[in-house]
């Protein structure tokens, strides 16, 4: 599958890259990496429509940019492009997320190997790190768990390593789905089922814990579906939105019978944990 790489030169200022990532994600971009002065955003060629290209010049996007250029990335070149930008990530000295070509670390409790392809969830982004910290701090032993919008399935893998059982990872992107299967195989965690789809395939399923690291609009739309399949006393842990979005997330959760337990943040990105009545 071929991709468009958008090379963005953001305006100078605090948190501009984070704001730009959120806005590009809202119009369909799937994966991001940050250089010293650039932001790289990726989307499949088939999804890079004339309407999306026009949106890049709207005030909504352009007010954050000095300039941008696009490049066509052929499928066979993708690994080399991604690997050139990929470094291992450490989470609180307890967990490492690394590629197969990185050396095996010593003294790390959880060693997760992720094939560095385009799927979101390599722990380089604040939201993935926030979610991983929640997973590291939660008692998951013997609990059924859903990783919704799973990307690389890094959260599902860590949850399985932490003792969760009957783990399900779901993503609606075929590339991410295939990459998740590959990553599950690399890490050999038990009882992880990888599915291709969206919230519509949740009907009839039930979980003790649901993880959802997507974006604000999808979370607000899909929270009723998450609540419907969440066990009484179960936890819903979400990220993919800014601190200023937290009140509307909490308000929607309250209407669904979800009680705020705690929240955390990093560079204005937020994560939140709710418990079901």
Image (spheres, helix red, strand yellow):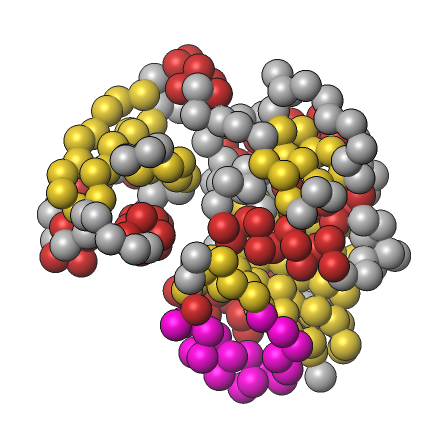
* Picture coordinates of residue 90, whole percent (x, y): 63, 39
Apparent side of residue 147 relative to residue 25 in the rendered image (left or right): right
Q: Nearer the viewer, residue 161 or 233?
A: 161
In the rendered image, the quadrant that contains the C terminus is bottom right
Magenta stretch encompasses residue 92: no
In the rendered image, the quadrant that contains the N terminus is top left
Q: Is residue 42 visible?
A: no
Residue at 73%, 26% in the rendered image: 105
Instruction: In the rendered view, tell whether residue 33 sits above or below residue 57.
Output: above
* Picture coordinates of residue 174, whole percent (x, y): 50, 35
Apparent side of residue 210 relative to residue 64 in the rendered image (left or right): right
Instruction: In the rendered view, tell whether residue 224 sits above or below residue 65.
Output: below
Apparent side of residue 108 relative to residue 49 in the rendered image (left or right): right
Residue at 80%, 33% in the rendered image: 107
Apparent side of residue 52 relative to residue 94 in the rendered image (left or right): left
Q: Nearer the viewer, residue 269 or 53?
A: 269
Task: Find the magenta span and give its range.
Answer: 244-263
């Amino acid at each position: 599958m071929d991709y468009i790489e958008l090379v963005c030169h953001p305006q100078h200022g605090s948190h501009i890259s984070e704001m730009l990532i959120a806005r590009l994600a809202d119009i369909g971009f799937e994966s991001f990496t940050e250089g010293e002065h650039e932001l790289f955003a990726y989307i499949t060629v088939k999804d890079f429509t004339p309407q999306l290209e026009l949106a890049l010049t709207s005030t909504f996007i352009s007010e954050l940019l000095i300039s941008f250029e696009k490049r066509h990335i052929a499928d066979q070149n993708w690994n080399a492009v991604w690997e050139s930008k990929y470094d291992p990530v450490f989470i609180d000295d307890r967990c490492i997320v690394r590629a197969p070509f990185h050396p095996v670390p010593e003294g790390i409790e959880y060693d997760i190997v992720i094939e560095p392809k385009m799927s979101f969830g390599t722990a380089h982004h604040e939201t993935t790190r926030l979610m991983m910290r929640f997973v590291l701090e939660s008692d998951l032993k013997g609990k059924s768990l859903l990783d919704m919008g799973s990307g690389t399935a890094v959260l599902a893998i860590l949850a399985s390593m932490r003792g969760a059982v009957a783990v399900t990872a779901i993503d609606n992107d075929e590339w991410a789905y295939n990459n998740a299967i590959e990553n599950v195989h690399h890490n050999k965690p038990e009882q992880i089922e990888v599915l291709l789809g969206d919230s519509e395939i949740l009907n009839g399923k039930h979980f003790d814990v649901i993880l959802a690291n997507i974006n604000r609009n999808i979370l607000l739309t899909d929270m009723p579906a998450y609540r419907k399949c969440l066990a009484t006393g179960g936890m819903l842990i979400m990220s993919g939105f800014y601190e200023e979005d937290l009140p509307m997330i909490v308000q929607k959760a309250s209407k669904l019978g979800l009680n705020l337990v705690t929240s955390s943040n990093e560079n204005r990105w937020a994560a939140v944990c709710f418990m079901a009545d």
